[in-house]
Image: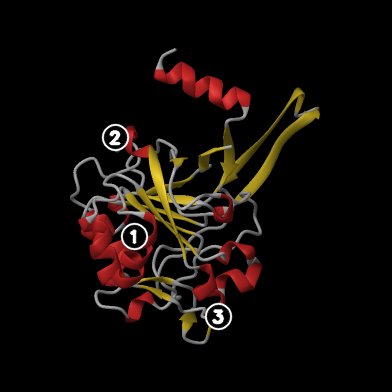
């Protein structure tokens, strides 16, 4: 059999299992909250058009609206000012080759469980590589914190001085860029730490990753079902004209 035939057979036999890394997109799912002087991310909204009734006797469908960065979502390079001139940097022009890539899952859930503001550093990544091998070029770097076990206000974790959740510092991002990852995936509402505005540069995951033409995945879940290496992630955003990002359904392929 060819490679794809073997792959298809492995899925049908259960030798490869599918893990859903996506939160359900619903009106109650938290969205990023910016200072009031800025424009705001719209939550998911839904309106029924018909449901086998006089509005449409044989069909059920709904209208929905949301920000490009609502729910489990993809960040394209053009999302940030540093990536505005990256060639083919919007979701409709990105080479789809980047949507199917191996994943390296860096588990720092123990550290994050005791520190809402846990900061991922280059030394943390190097220590992970000592145990699991070097992160291959073109892979997703996935930062596991188990933050997805939270919901509602606890998920946002807003205080008087803003949000508090784990994220990487600039050296960690530079290290991942040197490894030539395709992007960074996280369980939190953004790839940056909640207090990322205090870092140098501000919001280093956004500023450095997107400036280097890399991608982001936010609001992932079920990362505890993935091995440190060996999984493949499928993360294909909607093909929105000039889109800065998109909600999407992220799945992982894992050997069963």
Q: Secondary structure at mark 2?
A: loop
Q: Alpha-carbon distance for marks 1 and 3?
A: 23 Å
The residue that appears at 51% across and 87% down in the rendered structure is 160
Q: Alpha-carbon distance for marks 2 and 1?
A: 28 Å
Mark before the other along the chain sequence, 2 or 1: 2
Question: Label 3, on which residue?
Answer: 114
Mark before the other along the chain sequence, 1 or 3: 3
Q: In the picture, which quadrant includes the C terminus?
A: top right
Mark 1–mark 3 contact, CB under 8 Å?
Answer: no
Q: Outermost residue toward the top? A: 1
Question: Label 1, on which residue?
Answer: 129
Q: Residue 160, relative to residue 116: is it above or below?
A: below
In front of the other: 239 or 54: 239
Mark before the other along the chain sequence, 3 or 2: 2
Mark 3–mark 2 contact, CB under 8 Å?
Answer: no
Q: Residue 17, relative to residue 70: is it above or below?
A: above
Pair 3/2: label in front: 3
In front of the other: 109 or 191: 109
Q: Answer few, some or many: residues within 10 Å of disc 3's Cα (few below 14, many 20 plus, some between 14 and 19).
A: few
Q: Secondary structure at mark 1?
A: helix
Question: Label 2, on which residue?
Answer: 95
- Image x and y of residue 41, in percent: 48, 61
In front of the other: 225 or 168: 225
The residue that appears at 58% across and 42% down in the rendered structure is 19
Q: Secondary structure at mark 3?
A: loop
Pair 1/3: label in front: 1
- Image x and y of residue 144, in percent: 49, 61
Q: Report whether 161 appears left or right of 134.
A: right
The residue that appears at 24% across and 57% down in the rendered structure is 177
């Amino acid at each position: 059999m060819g490679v794809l035939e073997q792959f298809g057979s492995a899925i049908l036999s259960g030798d490869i299992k599918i893990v859903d890394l996506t939160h359900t997109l619903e009106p109650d799912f938290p969205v990023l909250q910016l200072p009031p002087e800025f424009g705001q991310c719209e939550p998911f909204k839904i309106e029924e058009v018909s449901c086998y009734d006089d509005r449409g006797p044989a069909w059920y469908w709904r209208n929905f609206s949301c920000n490009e960065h609502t729910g489990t979502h993809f960040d394209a390079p053009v999302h940030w000012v540093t990536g505005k001139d990256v060639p083919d940097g919007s979701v409709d022009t990105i080479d789809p080759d980047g949507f199917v890539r191996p994943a390296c899952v860096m588990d720092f859930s123990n550290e994050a469980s005791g520190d809402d503001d846990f900061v991922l550093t280059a030394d943390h990544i190097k220590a992970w590589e000592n145990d699991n091998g070097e992160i291959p070029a073109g892979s997703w770097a996935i930062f596991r914190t188990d933050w997805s076990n939270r919901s509602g206000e606890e998920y946002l974790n807003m205080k008087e001085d803003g949000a508090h959740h784990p994220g990487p510092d600039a050296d960690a991002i530079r290290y991942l860029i040197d490894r030539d990852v395709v992007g960074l995936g996280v369980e939190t509402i953004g790839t940056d730490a909640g207090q990322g505005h205090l870092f140098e540069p501000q919001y280093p995951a956004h500023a450095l990753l997107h400036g280097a033409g890399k991608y982001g995945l936010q609001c992932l879940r079920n990362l505890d079902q993935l091995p440190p290496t060996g999984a493949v992630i499928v993360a294909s955003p909607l093909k929105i004209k000039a889109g800065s990002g998109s909600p999407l359904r992220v799945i992982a392929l894992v050997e069963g």
